[in-house]
Amino acid sequence: MEKRDEMLNPYMIQNLDQLEFSEFRQKLQQLMEAGYSPLQYFGSPEGILYSLMGKSDCLELLSTAFPNTRIYPSLSKEYPAFNMFERLLHEQYNIHPEGHPWLKAVRSQLPGENAHSDYSFLSDDSSLLHEVGVGPVHAGVIEPGHFRFICRGETVEHLEIQLGFQHRGLEQLMLQGDFKEKTALAESIAGDTAVGHCLAYCCLIEQLADIQPKGREIRIIALELERIAMHLADLSALAGDVAYIMGQNFFAAIRTTIINSSLAICGSRFGKRWMTPGGVNYAITKQQARVLESTLQKARTQIIDCAEAMFANSSVVTRFDDTGVLKLQDALALGLSGITAKASGMIVDARMDYPCIENSNFVALTQSSGDVYARAYLRYQEILQSLQMILSEINQIDFQQAISTPINSLAPNSICSSIVEGWRGRIVHTAKTDAEGKPIWYRITDPSLINWQALALVMRGTAISDFPICNKSFDLSYCGSDL
Amino acid sequence: MFNLIKARIRHGYQAIPNPLKTQIHPSFPGRPSLSGKADLEALNRLCPVSAFEKKGLDLGKCVFCGLCERRYPDWICFNPDFKIAADKRENLIITPEQATMPPIQAIKGFKHSFAMRNVSAGGCNACELELGASNNVNFDIGRYGIEIVASPRHADAVIVTGPISKNMADALHATWQATPQPRYLILCGSCAISGGVFSNSVQLDRSFLSHWQACLYIPGCPAHPLSIVHGIHSLMGAK
Amino acid sequence: MSIGFLILFLAIIPALWKRSGLFSILWLLGSGIIAFEYLEVIYSRTVQDFMISFPYPIGTANIGISKLSAFFGTVFAIGLPLGMLYGHFYLKQHPSEGIRSHLFWLGILGLSMHGILWMKHSLLFLMVWELMSISSFFCVIHDRQQSLKAGLNYIITMQIGAAFLMVGFGLMFILTGSFDFNGLENMPRLPMYLLLIGFAFKAGFVPLASWLPQAHPVAPAHVSGMMSGLMIKAGLYGIILILLTNAFSLWEILVFCLLSIISAFWGVIHAMVSTNIKKVLAYSSIENIGIIGIGLCVGLLGKDAGIPAMATLGFAGAFLHIFFHSMFKALLFYLSGNVLVASHTLEIDKLGGLAKSMPFTAVYFLVGTIAISALPLGNGFISEFTILYGIFHAMGANDLPAMVFGAVLLSVLAFVGALALIAFSKLFAIIFLGEARQEEARNAQECPRGMRIPQLVLGLGILATGGIANLGLRFVKPILRWMALDMTMIRDFQTTLNQVSIVLAIVVLLSALLYLIRRMCVRESISATWGCGYQKPNPRMQYGSYAFVHPLSYFLKPFILFSKKQKQGDMAKGINPINSMEAVDPIFKYIVEPVSKAMSWFFELFSHIHNGKTNSYIAWCLGFLILIIIWVLGVR
């Protein structure tokens, strides 16, 4: 069994120092001032509050016990990046962050309320304002969520998003059964990010088992194929929403060829059943590599043709340009990740900051205008970047090598975090094992949990008819946020 | 504009000529063949969703993860046969040495058009993406008159994807009540049929299905667009 | 005739005893008789003319009716009793003090309205005119708390208008030596303009119409309906009287045209943004006066340019609109009275969903909306169609001014019609459709049957005159003939109208047939409105009145003055701090109010004269006497 290469991510620690609450808070503030951002901030059933802080190439895990009074001064006033985490903390463990700008339920109901549907929305009784409520059952084939707009005429003054309709209790389900055999569940955290979440889970298990996984190139190829497929889906949806039907159909058809390449190798269009702790389940043979290469080359020409035509089309550009602008300072303050952040100029990408698979020359792409156009164009650029990555990785596959190593036992009494850059942004899985290597708790943070705040922010002052393209330009996961 | 014409010409013809008779890639895990020698109990212990509890492999529970196929290739193999939909829950159980799926009984009156309203009831979004993909230029269910409509008032059937979480139970019920008679229920994906990988979760509320009987079950995780096309097309009874 | 008027005079007696029922019945009876007599005058060649001697300074006065007066008389005789009947039932719902005097002044109002049409002597005319203004003022301020300020504004504006009339008639007397209306023929410009302005005050042309949107919302519903539907037409009567007896140059017609266009446009855009039902209807009255003015312009242009078809159809359209407007505006005002009684508010942003609890009101409101938006089946369509048809004739002729005018008027009529449709769809939708926005609307119930009778009559009348397109024209033709207009193309026009009627009939019958077939074949089930499966909807989740017109407000900004009320903003949550936005009448705000404030300030300078001390009063009197004596003896 090979020893693991030393890497920052996945991050494992045993015997974590538990700080005093004031020390914990001071340390957090110091890290925030130094440019760190909270990757996770959560309570655990043992009554301990954890915070995983990260900056490019640095990770630090802090912990403290729950305050005795279960009340503490909120961090969100100074650092909005903690906003969503504190809401979740309040909902799950009834710990009250005093001075939180807006304590609302995230996935079910606040302590003290009866039902998920008891969520009280902001309301104003001016006669100029009216409300528009859409969902949970939306007009198209998309996931459920309730959007409440307060509109002054056709302009949105305020948007509030109620999620939690897809709460399936994933974090509890991860604790049941054999901890090493949870790939099927991890893939279903968010089915469109099956590879991303499963990879995070697998890396976590491998770190706990202290083995070096096989199939490095195949894993990169799977992750990037997923990224390309979903970016194409987004471009297709965006084109459809502005009635650029050519784009809608082209991108959807090209996406089919990409995901059929996944199907050809592992049997699933979404890359499900491909990853496993220790490596991958399905290898890429020489023949398959050749077919994949030619498919991707063909797709590349078609994507460039279609995207150039779309982004030169004036009716498309009119709709996209200057719509749903997310300012850089807001993105930085909220600690966003993925396309949502990069399109506003924030340089953040886990493949660069904490790569879980060795790749030394990755540079994150960004745009600066932060509008729908920037997010759409950045997707196009990332597709080309991912295609380039896959084509170079294909050349490096060793077809004779084994594709997986067995997992035996998991390290006891350890806390382990793994971070993967899914196509939406930064995925973080953290787990703690007990004395027998069984999990005590498992925390999943999909990038959508934080990024939904960006949508609520950009809709202020936008016309309500621009909501579909703003929503699709972010394309956030409802189920990833709901777990 | 010339760029666009050039792109269109290079794009070529993308539609699958006949989705009902097409060949899918051999890697696709479709209808399984269970050998008579298979030890169902061993398979059941291995299976993440315990799909081998009854006398065979229950496709309604199966998430097609391939674990059983990789571990015991002699006992079970999944054929690239996407025609796995069934109109009765019992017909989804593949017994050993079963070679075909039982045929689907068509419902009367929908030969040429069928309108569906999708309710995404807490799934992982993969089935929704596949349902949406069945509308695209490759699979094009519109050519059979199958469409996905925006309002349940326009729908003939409600197609449920996802395991029906507690928070979506009322919304699903409301959608069903809002659909005018005659109305049909279709369950798409293993989560909808049996709860899938979430079947043990306390956050589900599947009581809706104890009141209302579905008329079509489309297995898969996610259900492949070709399975969806085939299933609904057979339900419509068109030739 | 005298029997009818006698009955109307007698109606004052039950009024003094608060017997509003008997009052209305007598009015119905009397008006019925009078209406028949008026119709006789219109259709026959007889003219009723009396010369009565009055003491000095009136002298021998000519009292009688021409065909024009008879036309207006019929309109009044149809509208007034319905208003009195509605008033009887409405006041029963709104019991308050002062019914005795209110009914008395109502009776006087009605009588004076008829009286104006008979007086052909300017002094008598002015006396009855003043009586009409004063009686309407007392009727308006029935609900004394809220209405005093608006009522006073109204009466003062009317007095200013009457002052113009007095000066005008005075000049006429000086120039012709007699008070008789014969002097109206070929008058010199100054007295004519003064008289026109005086009548325009009453009719409601912009910029003299600031009183309308203030007086109508505070007046009780039946008074608003009668004022808007009928009293305004008295002003138009005066204007038409002068138009018929004088010749106008193209420039003067242009000015009149411009004023009409401005009135129409001004009225409709303010109707679009108002949130009080009666204010919307009041502004809409200004708009319709503008349309009638446009019709009169088309007639005058036709005469001036020598296009007889245009002249005839223009005047025909104007007269038809006068008649039809009285019907649908009265209907809408009475229905707003229904809404007020049921929900105790006229603010549409507090209402909603009333179609379920008040189906009768909703259906008749729809009929009124169809009529006022000039949609087919409503009679507004017929009158505007007539005017448009007249304009089409101008487009075909060779006269350049007529063609240019015609094009401009065509686009204005079309635009104004579209905006009226928006304003009234908004009104109907926000009040009757959707869900009740606040408590008052939730508890609303349909009004008692009595209130519905006049509305039923008016509604059926609207549908009848809208469906049977020639009905109104038959009524108007004798007037046109009397005005010596060319009647040759009327036959063709009537054929066109017949075709319209036939098409409408076919459409209605087909729709009814389809509906009945569907009723028989399809079994209906009723369930809750589809709301995306959301479990806790609230009444704020529906369109509001501001949202309805917001997309247009971009274009309306330069034309409407808004006063915005700020409140503490919640910028953290993104809500803009403007709490409410109300359209303000700039003429009132920038002209009337400053002038009256200046006058008050000026008079207050003398207020210290009123110091309560008898000594100083005597001193002032003494001082004045001394000055007078000095002036009489010294200066003279």
Image (cartoon, coloured by chain):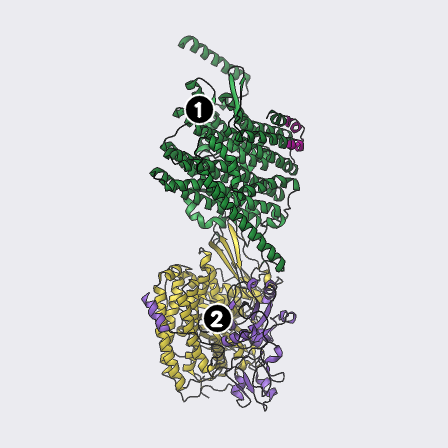
Chain colours: A yellow, B purple, C green
Cα–Cα gap, marks 1 and 2: 78 Å
**Percent coordinates x, y for residue A312 in the rendering:** 34, 64
Which segment is the magenta one?
Answer: C10-25
Q: Amino acid at mark 1?
A: Leu
Judged from the image, the secondary structure of the residue bearing numbered disc 1 is helix
Judged from the image, the secondary structure of the residue bearing numbered disc 2 is helix
User: Looking at the image, which is closer to me, C122 or A243?
Assistant: C122
**Percent coordinates x, y for residue C515 in the rendering:** 59, 55
Secondary structure mostly seen in the magenta stretch: helix
Quadrant in the rendering for residue A231: bottom left
Residue B131 magenta-highlighted: no
- Residue positioned most to the left: B2
**Same chain check for tags 1 and 2:** no
* Residue at image mark 2: B143
Q: Name above or below for residue A290 compared with residue C590.
A: below
Q: Name above or below for residue C295 compared with residue A207.
A: above
* Residue at image mark 1: C184
Q: Amino acid at mark 2?
A: Arg
**Percent coordinates x, y for residue C312 in the rendering:** 44, 36
Quadrant in the rendering for residue B200: bottom right
Disc 1 + disc 2, Cβ < 8 Å = no
In the picture, which quadrant includes the C terminus of chain A? bottom right
* Residue C565 visible within the image: no
